[in-house]
Image (cartoon, rainbow, N blue to C red):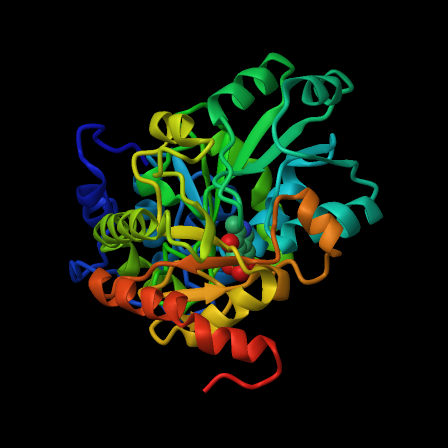
Amino acid sequence: MSQSPHFGPATRAIHGQRQRDTFGSPHMPIYDTTTFAFPDTATLLEVTEGRRQAPLYTRYGHNPTLFALEETLAALEEAEAAWAFSSGMGAISTLFLAHGRRGIACLGEVYGGTLSLLEQQLPALGIETHLLEGYKPEPLERLLASGVGLVYLETPTNPTLRLIDIAAVADQAHRHGALVAVDGTFATPINQRPLALGADLVVHSATKYLGGHSDLTAGAVMGSAEMLAPLWHWRQNLGTALSPQAASLLSRSLRTLPLRMQRHNASAQAIAESLRGHPAIERVLYPGLDSHPGHALAQRQMSGFGGMLTLELAGGREAAARVADRLSLFALAPSLGGVESLVSQPCATSHADLTPEERARRGIGDGMLRLSVGLEEVEDLLADLHQALDAKEAGRRGASGTPPP
Ligand SMILES: *Cc1c(COP(=O)(O)O)cnc(C)c1O
């Protein structure tokens, strides 16, 4: 649905949903029902033949709770349309099946599940996929010239927080008639708007910042109605539409997304600045630091630098594990984007399947710790990080065989 362009993100997050139920509830209730009855056959046909959008069958995504959520998702991304999925992977796999049949070129690091689809499952279906290391115009040009139809990328990437120039990729792809889809999970629609930069489709794991409370699993795809249309039968027949219960929870979360992102951005920036130069840390990777190789691009294409930051510990794998174990406010867990702070060591979790050489080629050091900076008081998070980093003596004893206290 079209939105008034002069409204800012916080207003769109709250007023993006225009539909009201018959009682005028400001928040669409959970329509916990699988099917909807019609007064007569003619009215039913209007809906089944696509002349009118109305609740019909929940697996189709034809449910008022989903419609309401999708209006807000579209408003946040300033997209013509948005569809909600059962998970981020539900959204990504549906997108690939609908738009990937002319071949997919993937630029740089992507989420593990996405990589598995591109390396294993899609090729098994005869879909050609190409994994490029980052964005370089020449190799992409060759693939586009050979007829590849979809360019896919994440920015910022996980866990090295590299950036890809969305506008440059879109320009190049469009010259060949290819589409560009961006996984915007790390940035959210608050910090980055790929459609405005020229991308055709945006996908999010709403399990992360959009949900924001580590209590729901969901995904979303946004774009023009024309770009979303090919996904329709796939979502319907794969059964990847979101449930009304999760849709309601996600609708509630979206109202505070702009507010939460402001705090995530500010706290991560403060932590990045405080930890850079710490003797136990070799590098702090954060797009908001002027030392970040993508900082200039981040200033151009992002309006906030996000809540994710990665530390590279000078002492390598053991040092990183010791710091992770000493943190008390950062829970040791995969995932990201919730109100609570999390820490993970990529070489032991998300990238454990790769050999050390493969990790090194991707710039993923074994001494890396990825932080998802939550909404706690930033002073408390900083104190926790500093005590964990400064406890060197105990750490050294731990490494030489005596367990740390
Ligand atoms: C988590 C994540 C996904 C997958 O999302 P699920 O909701 O877990 O299916 C995809 N992309 C990125 C960048 C992610 O962080």
Q: Is residue 311 above or below residue 165?
A: below
In front here: 158 or 42? 158
In front here: 134 or 58? 134
- Residue 244: percent from left, percent from top: 40, 65
Q: Is residue 243 visible?
A: no
- Quarter of the image that includes the C terminus: bottom left
In front here: 51 or 185? 185
In front here: 387 or 115? 387
- Residue 116: percent from left, percent from top: 71, 53
From the viewer's perspective, tell me whether residue 233 is left or right of residue 26. Answer: right
Q: Is residue 34 above or below residue 188?
A: below
Q: Is residue 203 above or below residue 338?
A: above
Task: Tell me which residue sits at (53%, 16%) in the image.
Answer: 171
Task: Tell me which residue sits at (40%, 45%) in the image.
Answer: 53
From the viewer's perspective, tell me whether residue 114 is left or right of residue 159. Answer: right
- Quarter of the image that includes the N terminus: top left
